[in-house]
Image (cartoon, rainbow, N blue to C red):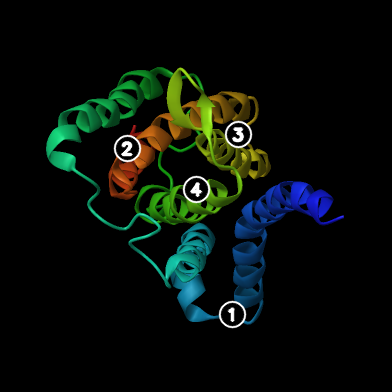
Amino acid sequence: MVKDEIKRQPIGFLSLAFVLVFSTHALPAWLVGMAKYFQWPLVKALGTTNSEQLLFLVIALALIAHDPAGYGLRLGDDMRRKWLVVLGICVVPILLTAVVYPFLPTKPFSGGPIAVWLISPPAQDLFFAGFLYRWFSVHFPGAIANSFNANRYILLTAACFSIWHIPGIAYGIGSFIWFQLAYTFTGACLMGIIRQWTGSILYIMVVHMSVNCIATYS
């Protein structure tokens, strides 16, 4: 009986993770909706998107507040030997965005609010690469394959990060959503390797903010 319960626990944790993922959309949206109903001046001044992403950032910070360094808010481990490889990997998504995004037929993030690149990326990275990554590392340990030294929870974190973008359909981005799901999953896997190598989410934040900034002003 106890063994069966232990085996079921990872599925329960995974289910809870998905609930948390979608809650980071639903809860800020509900709170901002209530604030708009009561005509709070701060929400009116910031706008809906900026307010929702600011609340997401507050939620993410609250989740990691008891151990910020343990969740990745630090410079990283042994960067003197790794910095060149880390830099090389971090540059790839930034360059690809700069080259590809301006020529896409659909550019849903162009001209977006400042939250798209200034607030949303840190909030997402604190939650996914910080909180969920560490959570998954406890409940889903182990490498993807013996010949490939990358942790399997990188894939779980990337999947959650990609799925988090599905509600973007409501913002009228159309078929772009499929492209977005593909590049967010691939990019999150790449950044997950940086997270594994360095133990830090700061480099991921810089890349994420840079990519979103390019998309906003292209």
Q: CA distance from mark 3 to mark 4?
A: 28 Å
Looking at this view, is 146 or 23 the one in front? 146
Relative to residue 67, is residue 209 depicted above or below?
Answer: above
Q: CA distance from mark 1 to mark 4?
A: 37 Å
Quarter that holds the C terminus: top left
Relative to residue 54, is residue 135 depicted above or below?
Answer: above
The answer to the question of whether label 2 and label 4 lie on touching residues, with beta carbons closer than 8 A, is no
Q: Would you say 54 lies left or right of 155 here?
A: left
Q: Position of residue 167 (x, y in %)?
A: 66, 44
Q: Which of the two marks, 3 or 4, is nearer to us in this view?
A: 4
Local secondary structure at mark 1: loop
Q: Amino acid at mark 3?
A: Ile
Q: Which of the two marks, 3 or 1, is nearer to us in this view?
A: 3
The answer to the question of whether label 3 and label 4 lie on touching residues, with beta carbons closer than 8 A, is no
Q: Would you say 31 lies left or right of 87 here?
A: right
Question: Residue 133: which numbered mark, if any?
Answer: 4
Q: CA distance from mark 3 to mark 1?
A: 29 Å
Q: Position of residue 7 (x, y in %)?
A: 76, 46
Q: Amino acid at mark 4?
A: Tyr
Looking at this view, is 2 or 131 the one in front? 2
Q: Which of the two marks, 1 or 4, is nearer to us in this view?
A: 4
